[in-house]
Image (cartoon, rainbow, N blue to C red):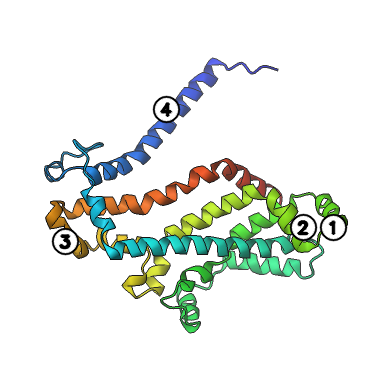
């Protein structure tokens, strides 16, 4: 049966598209303004003439921040934190979700109850801080990774996704000689790419934007991730590290801040296109079956 759009349907589609374009524009305009300011020459920034695009392009602000050792080191720390933290999250989530997806596991309901309990009632900020300090994780990357190594919400969705895989596939693999780990790595995980891609994005974005935990657990400035350094620059106006270069290149702190925002934002944006094709499918399939 061919679908024939009515006049009302077409009007709704047009209104829907216009509304989405409006929201997309509202979302993109601040980002374009920040990008334009970071690339604008000094004269245009001083007279407030930057709106959406600079009169001429200058890369002085980017040269300045990339010649600053503290900023580059914080960017390097954030990249390592994102990669190591995301791998840790994925491995632990998979290794816990897969057994919980098996009805033959003894104590499965009790474990699931405890997992759900942590969603409803968390330990709180101060007890978590005391545990991290007692374990000697202060000023280490472990303080930013281990307390949130397994997200209870993501664990439940991953478990539901594993449950949706037909058990006949696993039984056939076992008949062919696969053991439990073989079934997991050769059958289950290749079929779970949508879910894995989705949670990779969730965890990676969370680690890249990690700020509050870093403020609490990292007291040494040379170990700060990029978001904390960015906070120092934007909120506290701390751009002393760049002052020498700013004088030579004739740029102002506002331009430095805008360039820092772009550098702290763009890398994680590049992750999304590679995972986009799996993203919607992964979340929906994992959330349908309870």
Question: Label 4: few (<14), some or many (≥20) within 10 Å?
Answer: few
Residue 136, position as x, y percentages in the image: 47, 82
Q: Secondary structure at mark 4?
A: helix
Tell which of 198 and 153 is nearer to you. 198
Q: Secondary structure at mark 2?
A: helix
Q: Which mark is residue 243?
A: 3
Q: Are marks 1 and 3 in contact (CB under 8 Å)?
A: no
Above or below, comparing residue 278 to residue 95 in the picture:
above
Q: Is residue 88 left or right of residue 80?
A: right
Q: Which residue is mark 1?
A: 174
Q: Which residue is mark 4?
A: 18
Pick whichever of labels 1 and 3 is earlier in the sequence: 1
Residue 216, position as x, y percentages in the image: 39, 72
Above or below, comparing residue 208 to residue 129 in the picture:
above
Question: Label 1: few (<14), some or many (≥20) within 10 Å?
Answer: some
Which mark lies nearer to you, 4 or 1?
A: 1
Pick whichever of labels 3 and 2 is earlier in the sequence: 2
Above or below, comparing residue 54 to residue 288 in the picture:
above
**Residue positioned 56% across, 68% down in the render:** 121
Q: CA distance from mark 1 to mark 2?
A: 7 Å
Q: Are marks 4 and 1 in contact (CB under 8 Å)?
A: no
**Residue positioned 50% across, 42% down in the render:** 273
Which mark lies nearer to you, 4 or 2?
A: 2
Asked which quadrant contains residue 245, the reply is: bottom left
Q: Which mark is residue 183?
A: 2
Question: Label 2: few (<14), some or many (≥20) within 10 Å?
Answer: some
């Amino acid at each position: 049966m061919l679908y024939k759009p009515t006049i009302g349907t077409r009007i709704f589609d047009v209104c829907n598209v216009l509304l989405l374009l409006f929201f997309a524009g509202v979302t993109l305009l601040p980002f374009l303004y920040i990008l334009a300011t970071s690339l604008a020459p000094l004269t245009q920034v001083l007279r407030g003439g930057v709106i959406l695009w600079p009169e001429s392009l200058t890369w002085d602000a980017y040269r300045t921040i990339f010649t600053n050792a503290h900023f580059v080191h914080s960017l390097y720390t954030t990249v390592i934190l994102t990669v190591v933290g995301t791998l840790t999250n994925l491995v632990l989530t998979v290794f816990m979700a897969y057994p919980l997806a098996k009805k033959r596991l003894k104590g499965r309901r009790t474990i699931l109850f405890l997992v759900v309990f942590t969603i409803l009632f968390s330990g709180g900020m101060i007890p978590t801080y005391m545990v991290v300090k007692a374990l000697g994780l202060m000023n280490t990357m472990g303080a930013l990774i281990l307390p949130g190594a397994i997200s209870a919400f993501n664990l439940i969705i991953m478990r539901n996704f594993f449950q949706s895989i037909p058990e006949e596939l696993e039984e056939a693999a076992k008949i062919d000689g696969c053991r439990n780990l073989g079934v997991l790595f050769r059958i289950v995980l290749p079929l779970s790419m949508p879910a894995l891609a989705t949670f990779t994005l969730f965890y990676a974005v969370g680690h890249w934007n990690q700020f509050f935990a870093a403020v609490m657990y990292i007291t040494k400035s040379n170990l700060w991730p990029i978001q904390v350094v960015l906070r120092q620059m934007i909120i506290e106006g701390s751009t002393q590290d760049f002052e020498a270069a700013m004088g030579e290149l004739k740029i102002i702190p506002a331009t430095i801040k805008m360039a820092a925002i772009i550098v702290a934002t763009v890398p994680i944006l590049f992750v999304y296109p590679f995972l986009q094709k799996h993203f919607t499918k992964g979340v929906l399939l994992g959330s349908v079956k309870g």
